[in-house]
Image: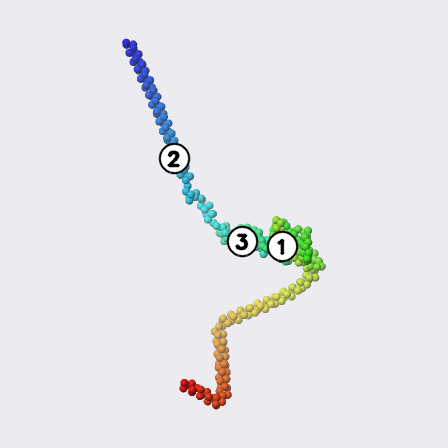
Amino acid sequence: MRAWGTDWLAELLLALSWLLLVGLQASQAANVTVAQESGVVHEAENESEVDEEAENDNDVPENETPAEPEEEVQNKTVVKEVEFGMCTVTCGVGIREVILTNGCPGGESKCIVRVEECRGPVDCGWGKPISESLDSVRLSCVHISPENRFKYLWKLLKSDQQPVILSNDSAVLDIQRELHPVAFECDTLDNNEIVASIRFTVYTTSELQMRRTIRPDTDAVLVFVLTIGVIICIFVIFVLIFIIINWTAVKSFWGAKASATEIHSELSSMKYKDSTSLDQTPADMRGHEDDALSEWNE
């Protein structure tokens, strides 16, 4: 009986110890789980805070732009205005200046930015040689630098015939004078497009000498006419200045002259009346008196 009771007590103690061990393990596991869950919660909170900060940084209003450096803002506020100069030619191809009127360095009001090509009407009409003598003439096509940028087509013009294309393809053509005047034409081409066309007349030696002898006489007449015109203009100006300075004297002179004219006209009218009165007969005078009395009685 005592042996059975001892065994039962030992089994009870063993069961209690086992339960205690199981309870300790369960509590440790619960603590670990709680610690893990709290770490996960803290990590999730940290991640949510980071995400919120990132979203706040990225959520920039549409009407707001990122801040820019002051230098870039100042450069953007400067508005550059450009104007173009006059073209160097009235026809064909030439050059012109591109002028900056705002935003020049050094505070200048205007500055040249670059030089660019400009064009006018293609037909330049009849031109003049760049040089000529009694034996030869040098002609030049319309072009700008560089000369080799363009292509040049020289043609000999004949009346009632097709033009004859010459072999010369340079911008300058040297011609010897012939017995008859001849005409030449040069077409300036850019990318197979005619940008300028000019014609020349090459006179004979005798015609050139005649034109040179006639020209001085024409120039002399022109100079004489211009000189006379200038003298007359200067004289008129001096007369006007004299009248303005001595306006009082001039006014009194013209007033005296006008009064003398009026007196002379009055004397003439009085003489005319006297002569008419002398020419009248006594009957006429009596008739005038009767008329006057009748009008008075009425």
Asked if 226 appears above or below 98 in the picture, the reply is below
Find residue 220 and report its horizontal and vertical position in percent: 63, 66
The residue to which callout 3 is attached is 84
- Quarter holding the N terminus? top left
- Rounded to the nearest whole Å, what is the CA distance between mark 1 and mark 3? 25 Å
Report how many numbered discs are placed on residues in the image.
3
Is residue 124 shown left or right of residue 54? Answer: right
Q: Earlier in the sequence, mark 1 or mark 2?
A: 2
Residue type pointed to by label 3: Phe
* Residue drawn at x 48%, y 90% as measured from the top left: 283
Secondary element at tag 3: strand
The residue to which callout 1 is attached is 197
Find residue 182 and report its horizontal and vertical position in percent: 68, 58
Which mark is on residue 49? Answer: 2
- Quarter holding the C terminus? bottom left
* Residue drawn at x 50%, y 84% as measured from the top left: 272
Find residue 102 and report its horizontal and vertical position in percent: 49, 52
Viewer-nearest of labels 1 and 2?
A: 1
Circle 1 crowding by C-alpha within 10 Å: few under 14, some 14–19, many from 20: many
Closest to the observer, 97 or 295: 295
Secondary element at tag 2: helix
Asked if 120 appears above or below 34 in the picture, the reply is below
Closest to the observer, 22 or 141: 22
Asked if 290 appears above or below 34 in the picture, the reply is below
Viewer-nearest of labels 3 and 2?
A: 2
Visible in this render: residue 150? no
Residue type pointed to by label 2: Glu
- Rounded to the nearest whole Å, what is the CA distance between mark 1 and mark 2? 80 Å
